[in-house]
Amino acid sequence: MPETFLNNPQTEITDNFSDLINKQFEGMVNAVCWQRNLEGDFEEIVSKLQLKQNITEISADELLALPLSEKGNIAKEIILNDLKLLTDFGASPSLNLLKKYERDDEFDFISTDVYSYHVDRSPVLTDTFLCTYYGSSSDIIANNQVVQKILIPEIREKLKSLHSGSDEDFENFLSENFFDLHYQAKPNSIPTNLGTGNLWRLAVDHPQQKVLPCVHRAPVEHEKLRLLIIC
């Protein structure tokens, strides 16, 4: 595991699910990781699943129906157990087979897709859970290493030119169109890759959240598909 992963003041590391869900976010810490080195053949699972669209949700029944080797079955049981742990906790996990996310190319000066550094916003105080079993994994980055895109003068001026309402409504316009959720990395910033097999809990943007939300981005997929749980 990269040194930045272990020494990152943004993250707390644990070795069990109970600590993952119970550790408090405080100070700079807005990401908790259940660090794991998983056994099993997740590539075999990916090879036997059917990609029906760019993002295909896989049900537990579809997973159970796969004819798998011994190592494939070990991987399957790990995924099913993660789904159960998260569901029992009260989350709504989704197992996705992913080719690519939709790109936002409407404007050439700002992007609002998940490949851009962004935070998640929720109407209730909750957390984002994420685990990549196979394929490229996401990055997180410390809040002091990014700047909110809407605060970059040239971007802000271009957004103002898109806004037809009053100056008082401009901030609402930014929020309603999710422009305020996106960030740009500062020069010489160092992101942390979440790795495969690790189950992460990330802080979201909510008025009652005690810490800054965790800034993260999806990886640019290559030829490999990606298998992940997210909720």
Image: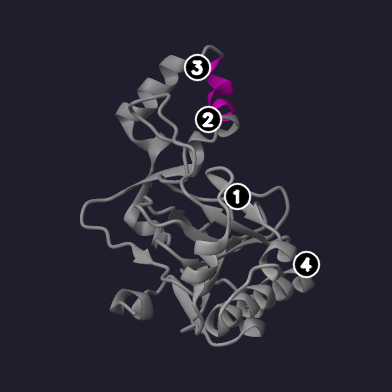
| Left or right position of 53 against 135 | right
First in sequence: mark 2 or mark 4?
4
The kind of residue tagged 2 is: Leu
Estimate the spatial distance between the alpha carbons at disc 2 and disc 3, rounded to whole Å. Answer: 9 Å
Estimate the spatial distance between the alpha carbons at disc 1 and disc 4, rounded to whole Å. Answer: 23 Å
- Which residue in the structure is indicated by mark 1? 56
Can you tell which quarter of the image residue 135 is in? Answer: bottom left
User: Residue 27: in sight, yes or no?
Assistant: no
Give the magenta range. 166-173
- Which residue in the structure is indicated by mark 3? 163
Q: Are marks 2 and 3 in contact (CB under 8 Å)?
A: no
Residue 171's spot in the image, x, y percent?
54, 29
Q: Secondary structure at mark 1?
A: strand
The colour mode here is one colour
What numbered label is drawn on residue 174? 2
The kind of residue tagged 1 is: Thr
| Left or right position of 84 against 55 | right
First in sequence: mark 3 or mark 1?
1
Q: Are marks 1 and 2 in contact (CB under 8 Å)?
A: no
**Eye-nearest disc, 1 or 2:** 1
- Which residue in the structure is indicated by mark 4? 90
Callout 2 environment at 10 Å: few (<14), some (14 to 19), or many (20+)? some
First in sequence: mark 1 or mark 4?
1
The kind of residue tagged 3 is: His
Residue 170 lies within the magenta run: yes
Residue 121's spot in the image, x, y percent?
61, 48
